[in-house]
Image (spheres, rainbow, N blue to C red):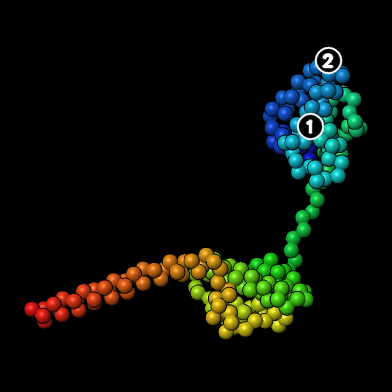
Amino acid sequence: MEASTTFKQDLLLREYGRNVQDLVNHILSVEDRSERTRLSHLLVNLMAKLNPQLRDTQDFQQKLWNHLYVMSGSKLDVDAPYPLSAMEYLNDKPQPMEYPLSTPRYKHYGQNVELLIQRATELEDDKEREAATISIGKLMKTLYRSYNKDSITDDVILNDIQQISKGKLNLDLAMIESNNLFESVSSKSQDSGSNRPQQQQNRGGDNRGRKNTRTTSNQRNK
């Protein structure tokens, strides 16, 4: 079932706005054909700025002129650079959208992480592959923490990388844990910030102990 002309005109009105429709109505009221043509060219340029995504489509200028022709109710009589046709727009059907057919194995990581791991397995240089694996591990740990409040260890992240890459990506777990390679900069700063109060408390306790030793030594001297 094709959309009615009135419905399609309403869609164009919402896309370009009431002011553009008022300009179209003004152009229709101009008696001089050359003046109508000049104003139509100016209006099409304005419509191109209001609808910039059409620049990526083929024959976008012709589509703009057809939009103008539809908004005029097929009454526009000007010297257009293209043959004006309302039927091309009115009978235009939306293109079907492509949906991903495969679901990610680990939903908390998402499909993009699996694609990154696939790209990393294709790297030939060992250093580049190791750096890519570390970056992916940091991302996976961040995504896991945003998806689940429970803490996750590096061995789980490394095991997931090995599972997704089918054993093509592998790192030394001891090296990862000793250097905190899977920790992002923000998480490191948060951990250091959380340790500061504890350090201050420990320092405070040490100072109190020093004061107590001083007081006891003074009492002995007396």
Query: What crowding class fits label 1: few (fewer than 14 Cα within 10 Å), some (14-19), or many (20 or more)?
Result: some
Residue 57, x across and y down, in percent: 82, 45
Q: CA distance from mark 2 to mark 1?
A: 22 Å
Tell me, for residue 31, which label it has, or none: 2
Task: Find out whether the residues at labels 2 and 1 contact each other: C-beta distance under 8 Å.
Answer: no
43 or 194, which is in the foreground? 194
Query: Of all residues shown, which one is farthest toward the front?
Result: 221
Q: For residue 45, which numbered disc appears in the image?
A: 1
Q: Is residue 221 left or right of residue 115?
A: left
Residue lying at the far left of the rendered structure: 222
Q: Is residue 45 above or below residue 165?
A: above
Residue shown at the point (83%, 43%) measured from the top left: 92
Question: Which residue is most to the top?
Answer: 31
Q: Splitting the image into 4 quarters, where does residue 206 fall?
A: bottom left
The kind of residue on which mark 1 rests is Asn
Q: Which mark is residue 118?
A: none
Residue name at image x 41 percent, y 71 percent: 195
Say which quadrant the C terminus sits in.
bottom left
Is residue 175 positioned above or below 19 on the image? below
Which residue is more in the foreground, 204 or 8?
204
Residue at (67, 73) in percent of width and height: 131
The front one of 59 and 102 is: 59
- Look at the picture and state if 85 lies above or below 98: above
Amino acid at circle 2: Glu
Percent coordinates x, y for residue 143 in the rendering = 58, 67
Query: What element does badge 2 sit on?
Result: loop
> Between tags 2 and 1, which lies in front?
1
